[in-house]
Every structure is written in C-alpha cells, then in structure tokens.
Image: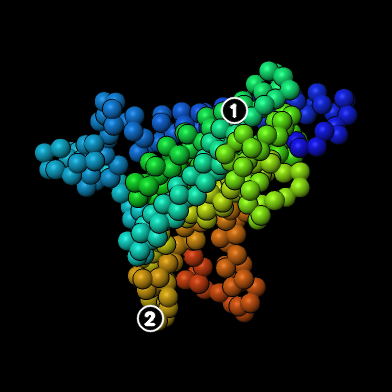
Amino acid sequence: MFHDHTSPQEEPLSELVGIISTAFLPLTSFISLSIFLSTHPRSPTRKLSKQRIALPTHQDEGLDGQAGEMEKDPFNIDDPAVRREGIPVHPEKFWSSTWKRKAWLLATMLLPFGCNIALLVTTALAEYPSLDARTKAISVPIFILASHVPTLLTMYWYLSHDDVKSNWQTTIHLSVDLCVQFLVIAILVLLPSTAPPTRRAEALFIDALFVQSDAFRLPHLSAYSILYKLLPILQLIPLTIVCFIRRGPPIHLPMNVIYPPKIVEAIPADHESLDVNHRNVSEEVEANVIEWMIFSYATPVIKKGSTAESMNVWDVPVLPISLREIIFHIQNHCLS
C-alpha cells in the first residue's frame, strides 16, 4: 500500500479484492447482529416484544417457566433425570472469571476501534492526487467503523450473559465477527487497493507527533502507514481473547442417575467421579471455540485410554446432555 510498484495488470485485481473485502466487513457484522437480535435468548428486542406462553418441559415447571401451583400443568410430563445436564461445579467462580475476560475483551476491542478512528481522521485531513483516490481511501476506515460499532454493542450485551446458552451463542457470534474483521483487514493491508496520501507531516498533528519523536523517526513511514499496519495487529488481540472464553462451567452428574445400582456399587468410594466438586461430564460442555472446532476436549480421554491397561465405565466421562438425549430417543422411540 505504501510502495507504488504494482503493475497495471495487478491494479484492477487489487482494487476488486479491496472493494469486495471492504464491503464484506459491515455486511457480515450487520447480518450477525440481525441474527443475534432475532434469535438470541437474551436479545434486547425480545424484551420489547410480547412474550409468548412457554409450555412446560418437565413435571415441576408451570406455564411460562413459573412454578406456581395455580399455573402448573395438570398433566405429568416425563422428566427422567438422565435428561438433566447436571450440577455445575463452582459456577460462581467460573462466571466471575468469565465476566473479567469479557471486560478485557471489550477493553481490547477499543484499541482497534480507536486506531481506526485515528486512521479516519488522518485520511480525511491528508492530501490525495485526485478526488477518486481520496474517496477510496476514506471509504476503508468508514466501512471498518461500520463493522466495529455492532461488534462493540454485542460485546456490551455480552457482559450480562451469565448462563450457558446465551453465553455460548454470543461467543460464537463474536468469534465469527472478529475473525472476519481480522482476515479482511489483513487482506486490505497485504493487498492494498488505495494509494497512500501525500506526506505532509507538518500539517497533521498525528504525523507531527511521529516525526518529532526520535523513537518513531523511521524512513518512509508516516502516521497513515503506521496506523494502517497496526490495525490488524490490534484486531488480533480481541479475537484471541474471545477464542479462549469457555462455553460453561464444569458439570458433575450423579452416577446413580445414568448407571444401574450394580455399577454404582462397584465404583471405589474414593473415585473422583463420585466427588460433587469434580467434573465427571465430558469437557465438551466447557470447551472454548478452538477446542470445540478441533475436538481437543477429547484429548484427556484419549491419553487415559492410551496409557491405562484397562478402563472401567466410571473412568470414562459422562456424555453431555445433547448426546444423552439422542441415545434416550433411540432407546424409547426407535427400538421400542
């Protein structure tokens, strides 16, 4: 972007990639925001719309989630304990730690946001060889700004999501948004489609700050080029943080819920699967985005199986609720 040695054949391709990439940024962010507002269980728009009556899902639940005797459903609904997710292990500690990560996520997102604002100001005050070049240069930070605003708004709502379902859905939304933003901005830096502004360091405060400081007296670099190259680096920080925010706390499920008494009685009294303060459900329920994508939550079980001479039923983690539901459905509906 800062060296004018591209051939005439490469310029149209570079401009096309830049236009498509730049327009893709706000499009992805607003589509994600629209899906979030229309489907998310903690969406602000759902509070404004009229709530529908929710039918009970188990015997002790009333209409719309109320447990009052007057609203309790008159029919007994089958609610086997095997369909319950389990007991969270130290949930207060988990959600407190997760809230701090979310706060850091919001704080670090302000870094690329501020860098882009500075880039926009620098671009607007600079001189360009033509009006067309100026318009193209200004459009890039404007489109990036349009994608940053919905992301920051979602991150603000993200702070109040303290249950597994809403927390995980928002984590997926932000992971996609931040990943797209980082990739597109990196492409714009590696394959520039706009000409750099005419260097007038004395006329711009930001340029003057870099030039007058001995620490930033670098050859062939202006404030514009430094901000532009710094933007994808700053964008990588919140992306890294959101990829390590976990789905939910560890889960413990009493062994007598899913195993017959004969197996439960054979479990050693000091085995960790009986300890309510220790997880015994698969680590999939507490995986982060990266672990979920590459199935690395299964690594502890694989290592245990590769080193142990033999394994009992209680040495294997309990399946998460999503898989237990499938097995329960097959047993009661497909095999009956």
* Along the line of sight, the residue nearer the viewer: 79 or 9: 9
User: Can you give x and y, in whole percent of width and height, for residue 333 in the image?
Assistant: 44, 43
Disc 2: CA contacts within 10 A as few (<14), some (14-19) or many (>=20): few
Amino acid, disc 1: Ala
Q: Quadrant of residue 197?
A: top right
Helix, strand or loop status at disc 1: helix
Residue 240 rendering spot, x and y as whole percentages: 57, 52
Query: Is residue 202 placed above or below 327 in the rendered structure?
Result: above
Is residue 333 rendered to the left or right of residue 27?
A: left
**Callout 2: helix, strand or loop?**
loop
Q: Quadrant of the C terminus?
A: top left
Which residue: 75% across, 25% down?
15
Residue drawn at 71 percent across, 34 percent down: 199
Left or right: 193 in relation to 212: right
- Neighbour tally class for label 1: few under 14, some 14-19, many 20 plus, Cα within 10 Å: some
Q: Which mark is residue 124?
A: 1
**What separation in Å lies between label 2 and label 1 (alpha carbons)?**
71 Å
Q: Please provide percent x and percent y for residue 270.
A: 40, 81
Quarter containing the N terminus: top right
The kind of residue tagged 2 is: Ala
The residue nearer to you, when weighing 236 against 45, is 236
Of the numbered discs 2 and 1, the one sitting upstream in the chain is 1
Q: Nearer the viewer, mark 2 or mark 1?
A: 1
The color scheme shown is rainbow
Q: Is residue 250 visible?
A: yes
Q: Residue at x 50, y 72 (%)?
A: 315
Residue 232 visible somewhere in the drawing: no
Q: Which residue is mark 2?
A: 269
